[in-house]
Image: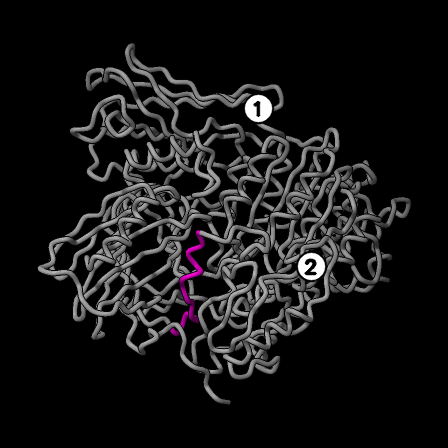
Amino acid sequence: MVSPPCYGLLTRQKEPVPLKSISVTLSIREFVAGVSATLNYENEGKDPLEAFFVFPMDEDSAVHSFEALVDGKKIVAELQEKSEARTNYENAISQGHQAFLLEEDDQAGDTFSCNVGNLTPGSKAALTLKYVQELPLEADGALRYVLPAILNPRYQLSRGSEGGGLQMKTPAVPSQDVPYTLSLAATVSSQHGIKSVQCSSPVNPIEYLEDKTSAQISLADGHKFDRDVEFLVYYSEVHTPSVAVEMGAPATKPDSLMGDPSAMVSFYPNIPEAQSPTACGEFVFLMDRSGSMHCPMNNQNPSQLRIEAAKETLIWLLKSLPVGCYFNIYGFGSSFESFFPESVKYTQDTMEQALKRVKSMDADLGGTEILEPLKAIYSRTSIPGHPLQLFVFTDGEVTDTFSVIREVKSNGQRHRCFSFGIGEGASTSLIKGIARASGGAAEFITGNERMQSKALRALKRSLQPVVEDVSLSWDLPAGLSAKMLSPEPTVIFRGQRLIVYAQLTGTMPPAEATGKVCLKYTLQGTQFENQVAFSLQPKSDANLTIHRLAAKSFIQTKDMGFEETPANDKKEVLKVSMECGVISSHTAFIAINKDLNKPVQGPLTRSDVPSPMLFAQSMRMCSPGMPYSSPTPLCCNFSRMGGAPAPMFGASAPKSGISLKKSGRRLRSGAPRSVKHQPHMEQYADFCAFDEMSQGCSSNNMSDLETNHTVFEDDPLVQLISLQKADGSWDLNEGLAVILGVSLGDMQAALPVKSVDSSGWATVLAVIWLHDKYKDMKSEWELLERKAVAWIHSHAGSATDGLVKAAVGFLKSSVDPAVFAP
């Protein structure tokens, strides 16, 4: 096989990529991370250079500083209105000045670009950006920090915006071919003590202080960009409510956000577990069926395919739904389709129909267009007494993230959205944004994490009775008041941490003064209160961390993208962004070096620095909207060909297509949108155009992915769950006997009470088997068990205790019969 040309790694003049390394310094204090990331450039060519680099960042990051160090000279950037900054950058370049521009993508809050303009031959530039962010709390109490390394391509909506997408200008390469290195050094500190720190990438031995209140961690040398860098930090105590008050910036006028003290309030409400009503909702599952879902869950071998993990998760969810609810399942790609024309009542018959379709479901719907199915779901008439609970699963990303978030937000009062980002590089802006807009919750599934456990965690939350009358009240000394900067909380889930920010205005009291803040809410008619007292002596922080996070929290509630934010909201976003120095989609950092002895002369060479992309994601290199036919997806195995792919043209190609200079062909940007599956022969023809550059893509190149295809029906746990009926019971049959490892005859003979329905005996045996064999996975089958136990008591009645005792003996189990308590 002839190796393809090496795109992305070299400039068009075959000169080395100017980005040489990325170094990151991370400081985690309690549940806030402060990050300083430096991009080190060097122009080894003979002409002046303009370099362009796009990189991902968690959308909760508040970027507040950008500066350049060029040949020993420090240039601090200024935050300007974005259009002005872009104009100033272009003017500076045209006049021969060195210029540096950092901006957030117009259409998504988790993608940034960095422009380096007029870097002279032989010059070195170190560009440093700083940001702070809250760390989310995982179910097991871990604080999670992710340094995104993978930048997956963003699918261009076929009717989406044609402008503003940063990815139109950036190539991508498989992670093993990234030409620059990453180093990271981290410090973790907590007054409560550190239990442990885990990292998804190899690290040097962790150094702890003797009292374990601080730890030093660094990545091992030779880190590869084959995954995001993820830290899980376990403290001795993370659930203690707290209030931190930070002093305002010196020399800043009072009555301004930066001039007044800011407060960061953290609550972890102890919400009791409550019984849900029998009929408790309409559950709609929106599943990504785009071609990339045929990729493995992670880069380990073997690894389950994403579509298979999704199908298994749907089985779990369907089996765990409460009797009497309504449900539907949508699949989306370039087109979308639903299992039922309208949501249907959850019965044995409708569940079986859905399960049959789930098992035949494949990643065959093309690109990633989520907006139209969302509109279709919201257009349905609400079912009285059954509030809508929407579950969105996707590994894909769209360019116009803010349009999707805006659609969810406009329907936020009638539903909650639980969103799941699948795999490395999932868009934090999309996943977090739609959850926040609807009062739901967001989860990310990476590495070896199981989709099922996080999906069932969300389902448990959705089944909890609604927490009502949520309010936050302040008890402060006379002359002092609190102005909320975060939106008032309206939804609180059991096991959720709640963080809000406030600006303290007025006269600060003496140092010994204290204040109180109280969180109140009502659950099933009972009122609860969480109160915390705090010192009103503000602490000084040179980085103004709490002020920056407060500004970011405020901006997130108003900023709907560069083009779509309403005028009044844009005015407020600009004011807070400029005042606090926190970037938004309407502002950008610009630094201009006007102190050169003379303007830079000569032809300006353009270099698009490639971003790392997982090999599994190289399927996205094919034409947008192109499906990957079952069982073998059409894609290019670049690791076998020894070369890097072409620039990511599919990521943001205009609707009319984008020309490929090498082939003269044109690629379409997606299949016609329809609620019915469309034939895709035209997309296959487009794939052939790309094949000309890749020098031979074929299904034979996919053997390594095929070996990763895990047939989920072979899992005994999945088999058992598949046999459970909608009401929670199991039938006494040969299928159950095989899973339990006994004969059907022995099961029938051991039935202790002949007058009892054999399904009661079968259900007791199934529940005991779950406890015996899969106790460590209880979070995934807890709802199934709950439904089964309720069914046993309603059908076996007084015979339940006898059935349980006999089943424990028959299976030679040590399970405590108390698990069957009503």
Q: Tell which residue pokes out farthest to the right in this image.
A: 755
| Above/below status of 585 relative to 672 | above
Q: Which residue is mark 1?
A: 468
Label 2: which secondary element: helix
Residue range corresponding to the magenta coloring: 164-177
| Within-10-Å neighbours for mark 2: few <14, some 14–19, many 20+ | some
Q: Amino acid at mark 2?
A: Val
Label 1: which secondary element: strand
Front-lying residue, 300 or 260 = 260
Query: Where residue 396 sits: x, y (%)?
Result: 54, 57
As measured in the structure, the alpha-carbon distance from the residue carrying label 1 to the one carrying label 2 is 37 Å
| Within-10-Å neighbours for mark 1: few <14, some 14–19, many 20+ | some
Q: Residue visible at 26% across and 57% down?
A: 185
Q: Residue visible at 37% across and 55% down?
A: 147
Q: Tell which residue pokes out farthest to the left in this image.
A: 597
Q: Which residue is mark 2?
A: 718
The quarter holding residue 10 reads: bottom left
Q: Residue visible at 41% across and 75% down?
A: 7
Q: Is residue 415 magenta?
A: no
Sooner in the amino-acid sequence: mark 1 or mark 2: 1
Q: Is residue 433 left or right of residue 408?
A: left
The quarter holding residue 42 reads: bottom left
Query: Where residue 422 sits: x, y (%)?
Result: 54, 56
